[in-house]
Amino acid sequence: MDQILDQLGGLFLSSLPSVILLILLYFFLKFTLFNPLEKILAERYRKTEGREKDALAAMREAERKAEEYTNALHAAKAEIYSRQEALRKDLEAKRDAAIAAATVHSEALLAEGRAAVETEFKAAQATVEREAAALARLVADKALFRGAA
């Protein structure tokens, strides 16, 4: 067993310079390669994270502007609909006024026509009565003249 321990001790002593060189290599690589690499990765992460935050802020701004656009669009549509409704009511009022004026005008024409027909009727009736009386006299004269012959 002593022999094994002596061999292990010899192996340890012979590997000690390699272990020391390995430890030195570790510290050398840590300070020259790993620390700057970690700084670069941390900077890259900060920039990436900042860009993500900027992208999220831009998305929020775009959503806000889209909301404003939608609200403006709804307001414009409501304005258009209210103008259309006012125009429709105005046109209905003008149509109703035109219908009323046409009704008054047609009633006046109808009254004039009735008065003209009534006048013509009375004139025709008077003419018929005169001619009927004349015809009656003529018929009576003829009837009496024949009866005397």
Image (spheres, helix red, strand yellow):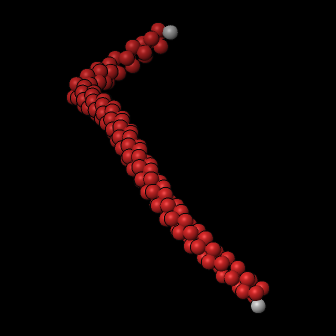
What residue sits 74% from the left and 83% below the top?
143
What residue sits 28% from the left and 32% below the top?
54
The quarter of the picture where residue 14 lies is top left
| 57 or 106: nearer the viewer | 106
Residue at the extreme front: 148
What residue sits 55% from the left and 65% below the top?
122
| 99 or 33: nearer the viewer | 99
**Does residue 77 appear anywhere in the picture?**
no
The quarter of the picture where residue 130 lies is bottom right
Q: Position of residue 77 (x, y in %)?
A: 38, 42
Give the answer, above or below, for where 125 lies relative to 46.
below
| 125 or 94: nearer the viewer | 125
Q: Position of residue 60 (x, y in %)?
A: 33, 32
133 displayed left or right of 119 = right
**Does residue 79 appear anywhere in the picture?**
yes
So how many labels did they put on this image? 0
Q: Position of residue 82 (x, y in %)?
A: 38, 41
Give the answer, above or below, for where 31 lies relative to 126.
above
Give the answer, above or below, for where 47 lies relative to 92.
above
Residue at the extreme bottom: 149
